[in-house]
Image (cartoon, helix red, strand yellow):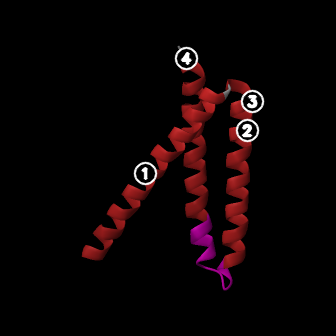
Amino acid sequence: MMSIDWNAAMLGCVVGAVMSAVFFAGLSFGMRVALRTAIPIRILSLSAALRIAVFVGVGWVVVGQGGPWSFLGYGIAFFVARFIVTTVARARAHAGAAL
């Protein structure tokens, strides 16, 4: 029978949740800055490359410290945060369109 390392999974969840918040805050900031410039693709590309590199780099460290269960927690935390962020963004967009 396979045993689950809950401590490693929770470590991955906690770090993944924090990194997801940083990732989506960076996305929001990058979008606001890019939409104010004449050539937004440069800002968006740099922002995306930086966010992805940091997210993957921290994920690499988490996996090195906690093993595969921490990777699972890290990934689950990102997808849960992504679901929450997109749901809130859609709700705000619909509320803004109704006004």
Report the side of 52 relative to 35 (left or right): right
Please name the residue that numbered disc 2 is placed on. 60
Residue to which mark 3 is pinned: 64
Identity of the residue furthest to the left in this view: 98
Measured Cα–Cα span from mark 3 to mark 1:
27 Å
Callout 2: few (<14), some (14-19), or many (20+) C-alpha neighbours within 10 Å?
few
Queried whether the magenta region covers residue 6, the answer comes back as no
Please state which amino acid type lies under the numbered disc 1. Answer: Phe
Where's residue 21, x and y in %? 55, 47
CA separation, marks 1 and 2? 23 Å
Instruction: Identify the mark nearer the N-term, 4 or 2.
Output: 4
The span shown in magenta is 30-40
* Residue located beneath label 4 in the image: 2
| Residue at the (41%, 50%) spot, across then down | 84
Residues at circles 3 and 2 in contact by the CB criterion of under 8 Å:
yes
Q: Badge 1: how crowded within 10 Å, few (<14), some, or many (20+)?
A: few
Residue 58, label in figure: none
Q: Earlier in the sequence, mark 4 or mark 1?
A: 4
**Residue at point 72% right, 75% down?**
42
